[in-house]
Image (tube, rainbow, N blue to C red):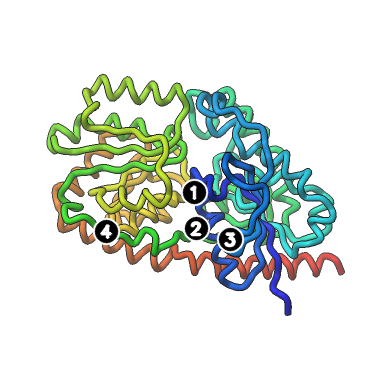
Amino acid sequence: MEALKICLLTSEYPPNIVSGPGRYTENLAIGLRDKGYRVTVVTPLTNGSKEYEELNGIEVYRIKIPRSSTLEKIIPNILDRRVFFGIKAKNFLTKERVDEYDLIHVTNFTESFVLTNEIFKKIPTVVSVNEYYYLKSTWNILKFPYKTMDLPLRYLQHNILRQINTRVLNKATKILANSKYTAKAIESCGIPEDKIQTVYRGINTKKFDVKPTEDKYTNHSILFVGGNMERKGGKYLIQAAPSILRDFPDSTFILIGRTSWMYRQLLNRYIKKYNLRKKAKILDYVAPNELRHFYARANVFVMPAIVEALGQVFMEAMMSKTPVIGSNVGGIPENISDGETGFLVKPKDPTDIKDKVFKVFEDPTMAKKMGEMGHRRVLRLFSLEKMINETIRVYQDAITIFKGNLR
């Protein structure tokens, strides 16, 4: 029997990966290839990349999309590659191309409007939902999931995408939720429960299984990594910094992640106000292969997100034997075992962040034990092998369901 051919549609793929969904798609493509599947990836064209190539045994098509670096700096994650890619990819998926594949998988819900009625009729489709907050958007602005500095634009974007993509989810053969919390959010939009399957994101455990530095559990280094720094709560870590420094004056803070120009200016004002210039460093981007070195040294990883579906960076930190601190929101409690691999904190609460950081700093033996327990938890729940096997079962179910509907 000839190996199945799977088409993955994604707005992020090497050499351009800036967030969790991109790393997820790369891991998925490699895992499917290793299982004998024929994999095609369709993704945006970036500077220096080719429109078509075979990359490590994976067929990659790159589509040219409009870009504005200025807009992406001012309002990142709104008029970005995900929206433009979804529009342009519709032209790529001609009838002839669709006929080449056994299944199409859109790996990020916000791009799912690329799927048309003709595609739904011709081929099994799977959509991954990595972000529940679009689904919780409402036209009542007072009940918007989280208030941002670019609220009017984000309010419109989230609600429009919710309307468009919810209709797509209703037509998809199967839906992959990255957490149980996300699955419940999908159900709340009227999607049948039997269409949804929770599959936790897996990480490349070998990549992040790094040897801790000798001073890891005593160096008072705090690391934050978040693709959208505002939503991930970077401000609250900076606000906790003065209190942390009063008891641990050698503490350092590294924050890695994209943010709007306005939010970056807000963070800079806090850094100036609290006199943190020599203590806090903000980096817009670090290549995935370089992140491992930051994890290896971090005494504690802190990402106090306002909303979060799961948080792949927690897994990466735990795999590097780093204690983790995250907000008690969304799917984070499914990721962090409170009191064992790290701590959960109240959202938007710098004081609680400070208290939990103190617990890690005050007890290096406990910190080391938390790191080791986190490492074991990732191997048990969030390995790439587990994710690939569960995803393949969803593909098989989707193909069976699709063929049954044709009878």
> In the structure shown, which secondary structural element does the residue marked by tag 2 occupy?
loop
- Comparing labels 3 and 2, the label whose residue is closer to the camera: 3
**Residue at 60%, 57% in the rendered image:** 176
- Residue 378, image x and y in percent? 38, 62
Q: Which residue is mark 2?
A: 201
* Left or right of residue 21, residue 105 in this image: right
- How would you rate the neighbour count of disc 2 (Cα within 10 Å): few for under 14, some for 14-19, many for 20 or more? many
Which SS class for mark 3? helix
The tag on residue 29 is 3
Q: Earlier in the sequence, mark 1 or mark 3?
A: 1
Quarter placement of the C terminus:
bottom right
Estimate the x, y position of residue 302 in percent, counting from the top left.
Answer: 32, 44
The answer to the question of whether label 1 and label 4 lie on touching residues, with beta carbons closer than 8 A, is no
Q: Earlier in the sequence, mark 3 or mark 2?
A: 3
Which residue occupies the foreground of this view, 187 or 380?
A: 380
Disc 1 and disc 3 in contact, CB within 8 angstroms: no
Residue 300 visible, this angle: yes
> Gap between marks 3 and 2, in whole Å?
13 Å
For the residue marked with disc 4, what is the amino acid? Gly
Above or below, comparing residue 290 to residue 348 in the picture: below
